[in-house]
Image (cartoon, grey):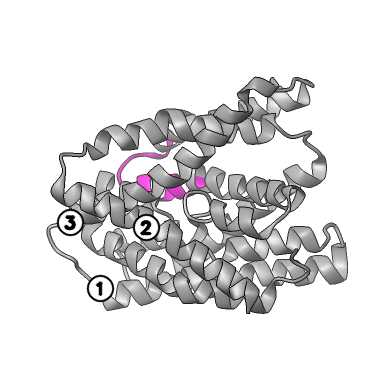
Amino acid sequence: MIIFSIVFFKTVSVLLSVVIGFLAGKYSNVEKDSISSLLFYFISPIVFFTIPASTTLTLSALSVTVVTFVIATLLSLFSYYFFGKFWQDHTRNIIALSAGTANGGYFMLPIAAALFDDYTLSIYMMAVIGINIYECSVGFYICMRSLTNTTDSILKVIKLPILNAFFLGCLFSFCGFTLPDFLDDFIYNMKGSFSILGMVMVGLALSSLQKFEVDIKFTLATFAAKFLFYPLGVGLFIMFDHFVTKWYNNDYYNALKLLSTAPLAANTIVIANLQKFYPEKVAATVFLSLLFVVIYMPTMVSIFLSDLN
């Protein structure tokens, strides 16, 4: 019950940033594009450079990034072909993107920090990086492939700032460099800004909608991909590792389990707007997923996560 309460109230507090963003978008002249550019080109790359750069990278830690990337990619491809039976337009692309993504950074970082010690939190963040690499590469490509040829799609992926920042951070760590101590406060503030502004962007996106359009069929399909297929995929991997490969311990399992409960990624709204993939119903579905996890996440964490401090 204590764990349920911690996660529940943390979830509610994170959602307050969405409310602030919505009110700011409705009643104040806030420039959404400026905040989006600030996040995309500056804050996100800084955060995802400092995560590997601040850690002594090991094969074990890096392998979690690979694991989450592979799981997300497989779930996305499965959803693309499975839901292709029901949709032949761009809908299948956005569902496939959503199936592999998770709001593991903006929404989940404060919750993970409340539940985990520093060691498990670092594992969790490396897992999040795998999801972000998927989103910036395979996920983005799945959306772009319906509009551009393969070469153009791959070039767009290669140029993404967050992807380049992560690889530079890995190179920085492997070369044996360390970030100076005087940057600790700056890094901490960047992570806080990353979470708050990311959720404010969700509110701003919702405030700009001309109508709140809920497509029941689309919402159910997206929820099935995110809240059913995703936990099942992670659960199958954990069972396989526990009984067969035995690569990881309970700290890794808890990090993966928490990530599997995350709501739909906020960036899905941005991509839907950019590509004109039914932005109203995508934004509505993302918002509904945020409301859904208020109960879903505390329940799942209370049942399935173990040995939490």
Helix, strand or loop status at disc 1: loop
- Quarter residue 179 falls in: top right
Classified by dominant secondary structure, the portion drawn in magenta counts as helix
Give whichever of 20, 83 is nearer the camera: 20
Disc 2 + disc 1, Cβ < 8 Å:
no
Front label number (3 vs 1): 3
Residue at left 59%, top 49%? 128
- Is residue 25 at all visible to an observer of this figure? yes
The location of residue 17, given as percent across then percent down, is 37, 53
Q: Would you name the residue on which mark 1 appears?
A: 215
Asked if the stretch drawn in magenta spans residue 198, the answer is: no
Nearer the camera: disc 2 or disc 3:
2
Can residue 86 be seen here?
A: no
Stretch in magenta:
138-151
Quadrant assignment for the N terminus:
bottom right
**Marks 3 and 1, how far apart at CA:** 15 Å
Q: Which residue is mark 2?
A: 16
Counting residues from the start of the chain, the first of labels 2 and 1 encountered is 2
The one nearer the camera, 50 or 10, is 10
Dot placed on the residue nearer the N-terminal end, 2 or 3: 2
Q: Which residue is mark 3?
A: 209
